[in-house]
Structure formats: C-alpha cells, structure tokens
Amino acid sequence: MARKAKTVEAVAYIRTSSAANVGSDKDSDKRQRLAIEGFAKRAGFALVDEFNDAAVSGTDPIEARPGFAALLDRIEGNGVRTVIVEDASRFARELMTQELGLVVLINRGVKVYTVSGDELTDDSDPSRVMMRQIAGAFHQYEKARLVGKLKAARDRKRATGVKVEGRLSWSQMKPEVVQAAKALQYLTKTHQRSLRAIAAELAKQGHLNEKGNVFTPMVIRSMLKQTTPPTSS
C-alpha cells in the first residue's frame, strides 16, 4: 500500500490597498481569502495561518509592513516554508519592491505561489534572477547614497562653524515609545517577543517612525537598550 504524501503547511498573505476594502465583509480581502483557500485545497496545501496588511499600498516597502513582519516571525519560528498570495500584485505592485520582498523570503528557503499556480520564487528563469540581483544592488545603492547625502550635509554645516550634534536617541525624543517597547518585550517571564513582533504591536498602538513606517528590528533593539528618564510624580 502506497504511503500517503505528507501535507505541506502553508500561510496566506493578503494585502488591501484601501481602507474601504478592509474588513471580513468587504470584497477585496474576502475575494483574496477565498481564492487562496481554493488553490490550497486543489494543490494539497494545509493553510495554518493568515497574515494581512490592511490599507497598505503595493508600493510601500516590504520592511514597512506589519503584516509582512509578522509573517516573517511565523516563518522563522515554526518552519512553514510556503506562502500563498492571490497574485503578484497583492504581494507588491512595483516590480522592484516585489523582487526585494521575494529575495527576503528566498533567503529563508520560502516558496511563494499565486492562486494560478505560478511560483514567484522560481529561480530557473535567468531574467528573474537578474532582476533580483538588480533590485538588491539598487537597494544597497540607495542606502549608500542616503548615507552619503546626510554626511555631506553635516560636513557643510560643520564648515560654517556650527556644531553638529549626533541624532537624539528615541529615549530623548519619544520616551513613551521606548517604554511601550520595553513593556511589550516579554510575552511571559520566560518568553520574549521577537523584535519584529514588538514593532508590529507598536504600530497597532500608533507608534511609528518619523516617516510613518513601522520601526525596523534594529531600531527596536536599540530602544530596548536605552534608559528612559524617570517620570515625574
């Protein structure tokens, strides 16, 4: 008797771009959910979780999405290595943003499928591999360019004789955010939340960075090390 193949666990990723389409009774997320569930059943996947970025633009950076951050935490925590989306545009509308996000998942051994059966993480197509390399290189270039512009601005200011101070810490600028992050650090006395989970929880509370995006894990780590000033009684 042939042994039955083990069911592969998968998670769903849903993104709605407008607040008008948010909610279980709305068409956009309901349509995506039904399409994903149908594909999972046909393809033999067992859906074990769902992650949703509500009212998030398809052009928003992957790292700024709380739902995607929670998805990464789940992947890193329990070994699920399959993600299903309705189509590539639900993952990201801009090709560069899409490929950067896929690289993040590919580096974790994850496969991403659309409900039509396309594997977005397929690396057998040389043109897609090239695009991912270009996307990664462009992302690094933009980061280096921004760092260079900031340094040049500081140097010009110093040349005028003005003292340029370092950036204020979050405990100086927003001590309440640091306190909130520290309060979220532990789920129990023995179990800590991940940095991404803390960032996602802060976003739910309305705490975002100066650009209105979710804090990065690096910033959260810095916050947890900072000392907040005592509150006046």
Image (tube, grey):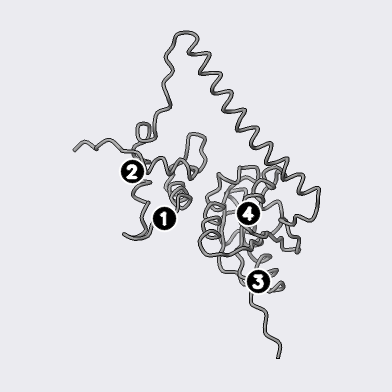
Camera-near label (4 vs 2) is 4
State which tag comes first along the sequence, 3 or 1.
Answer: 3
* Residue 117 position within the rendered picture, expressed as x and y whole percent measured from the top left: 75, 64
Residue under label 3: 45
State which tag comes first along the sequence, 3 or 4.
Answer: 3
Residue under label 4: 105
What amino acid does circle 4 point to?
Leu
Q: Quadrant of residue 121?
A: bottom right
Most foreground residue, 66 or 125: 125
Query: Which quadrant: the C terminus?
Result: top left
Asked whether disc 1 touches disc 4, contact meaning CB atoms under 8 Å apart, the reply is: no
* Residue 150 position within the rendered picture, expressed as x and y whole percent measured from the top left: 54, 23
Q: Residues within 10 Å of mark 4 (few under 14, many from 20)?
A: some
Q: Left or right: where does residue 138 sit relative to residue 75?
A: right
Measured Cα–Cα span from mark 2 to mark 3 = 41 Å
- Residue at the image point whose x is 52% and y is 50% from the top: 66
Measured Cα–Cα span from mark 1 to mark 4 = 21 Å
Residue under label 1: 193
Residue under label 2: 179
State which tag comes first along the sequence, 1 or 4.
Answer: 4
